Image: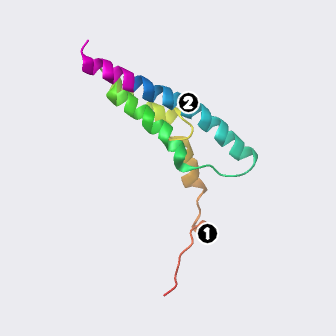
Amino acid sequence: MSALDIIRWVIAGLLAAFWLLCAGGNLTSLIGAAIRKGSTSFILFFGGVAGVLSLFICPLPGAARWAWLPPLLDIGSVPAAAAICMDISPDDVHHDNAA
């Protein structure tokens, strides 16, 4: 195993651990927001991005083909984006028509 492979394993492992922490935090954050009928932040997307990067960096052959999975499993990424997009109505969009 080369030094580059070791570095790639370490970085991929750290990013995967960060994704797991974010996924757990995102779940509790979204549950809390639903209970208090509040909102959350777009920072929730960082977990899914870290998961994708971890699979692209991982030196394991074929790992990159699974890069779609972390954002799908992390409720703060794709599912939250879909919920946000479905919740926006034309009445929620404010236009500034000041001349």
Q: Nearer the viewer, residue 26 or 17?
A: 17
- Closer to the chain start, of discs 2 and 1, is 2
Q: Give the quarter of the image for residue 85.
A: bottom right
User: Is residue 76 located in the magenta-colored stretch of the structure?
Assistant: no
Is residue 60 visible in the rendered image? The answer is no
In the image, what residue occupies the spot 43% across and 38% down?
49
Q: Is residue 93 above or below residue 76?
A: below
Q: Nearer the viewer, residue 31 or 72?
A: 31
Is 82 left or right of 40, judged from the image as shown? left
**Horizontal and vertical percent position of residue 65:** 34, 28
User: Is residue 2 located in the magenta-colored stretch of the structure?
Assistant: yes
In the image, what residue occupies the spot 55% across and 34% down?
22
Residue 41 has which mark? none
Q: Amino acid at mark 2?
A: Leu
In the image, what residue occupies the spot 53% across and 28% down?
20
**Horizontal and vertical percent position of residue 75:** 57, 37
Q: Amino acid at mark 1?
A: Asp
Range drawn in magenta: 1-11
Residue denoted by label 1 = 91
**Horizontal and vertical percent position of residue 43:** 53, 46
Residue 21 has which mark? 2
Q: Is residue 6 above or below residue 49?
A: above
Q: Give the quarter of the image for residue 68.
A: top left
Q: Secondary structure at mark 1?
A: helix
Is 37 left or right of 74, judged from the image as shown? right
Q: Residue furthest right?
A: 36
